[in-house]
Amino acid sequence: MATLLDVARRAGVSTATVSRALTDSGSAVTPQTRQRVLDAAEALGYQPNRLPGYLRARFVPTIGFVVSDIGNPFYTAIARGCEDVIGPRGYSITLSSTDEDHAREAKRLRDLAAERVAGVIVTPDGEPSAELHALINAGVAVVSLDRIPGVHVDLVGVDNEHASFEGVSHLIREGHRRIGIVAGPEMINAAKDREAGYRRALREARIAFDPSLLLRGDLREDGGYRRALEFFAQEHRPTAIFSINNLTTIGVLRAARNRGLRIPDDVSIVGFDDIPTGDLLTPPLTVVAQPTYFIGAKAAELILRRIDAPDAPVTEAVLSCSLIVRGSTAPPKVQV
């Protein structure tokens, strides 16, 4: 790796002149000398050492993004939206996965605090940790992608309850009355809101809630697979399934294939969250799609605003979801 001295030797100037030329500070460096230094730095592939500046600064221009499952494409789409906004402002993003492990989340938050990041975007999976409270109390900018009990921070999310209501109502309009839901953990607010939307859709359609049609998964593919198999093993199995998130939906689809069930002839499926190539499946998947990229972009806007104005009022941005009707839903052939 080229050093400041290497650049100075190639340009035929002192290291002090190189430093002034690269930082564009002061008028002591002539345009011709500055260009010679820039040409030498480019030829050598020189990268300035930013660490001394970071040590003097209040924080490092990095945003931590702490998610529950880094393998979920939902979060990578959000990260892309975030990066496109913070990048032009000179910030970078560091992505961490907690795997829904509170100890792992606490350690990563401690690490981010020690690294003096400018801000943290979090996807909470339950009660807030002491480490999250410590970040907030230390004045670190925090944006949450879901409500956190007892914590008042900037928030970006969607109307999960209404979005689920729309998805389940679509199945009801198709004529389904026995609709199963692969729900999520009760301690996650977004999962609770989606379950509430399912219940409201049944209630408004005067369909009695049947406890056997609500099975809880873990928001992962295997959980969706296991719960769907339970549904398909019921004597009076559901004619339709509403799935709580994208990975769960993949598990439900795998279980249907495993049991030789045809979609939508044997069972209709609506998923919460679109999945990559969901429109290319056979049949294409009906989903309630979240605006993932724009969630990330909005979270980035709010965290930059919080960095610039620490005392600004807390903002809650609620974005709309879209029901995308494709081929995985149809009227039931036999009403059970």
Image (spheres, helix red, strand yellow):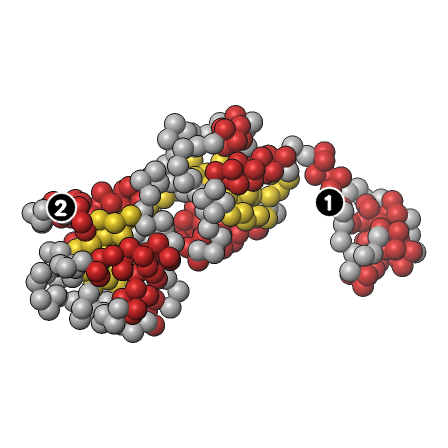
Per the image, label 2 sits on a secondary structure element best described as loop
- Can you say which quadrant of the picture contains the C terminus? bottom left
Crowd rating for badge 1 (residues with CA inside 10 Å; few <14, some 14–19, many 20+):
few
Q: Position of residue 331 (x, y in %)?
A: 12, 66
- For residue 139, side relative to residue 75 (left or right): right
Q: Is residue 291 visible?
A: no
Judging by the rendered image, the residue that carries numbered circle 1 is 50
Judging by the rendered image, the residue that carries numbered circle 2 is 209
Q: Is residue 209 visible?
A: yes
Q: Residue at 35% x, 62% y: name it.
A: 250
Q: Position of residue 62 (x, y in %)?
A: 60, 43
Q: CA distance from mark 2 to mark 1?
A: 60 Å
Q: Earlier in the sequence, mark 2 or mark 1?
A: 1
Q: Position of residue 121 (x, y in %)?
A: 49, 42
Classify 200 as above or below 230. above
Which image quadrant for residue 77?
Answer: bottom left
Per the image, label 1 sits on a secondary structure element best described as loop
Residue kind at label 2, given as amino acid type:
Phe
Residue kind at label 1, given as amino acid type:
Arg
Q: Residue at 23% x, 70% y: name it.
A: 261
Crowd rating for badge 2 (residues with CA inside 10 Å; few <14, some 14–19, many 20+):
some
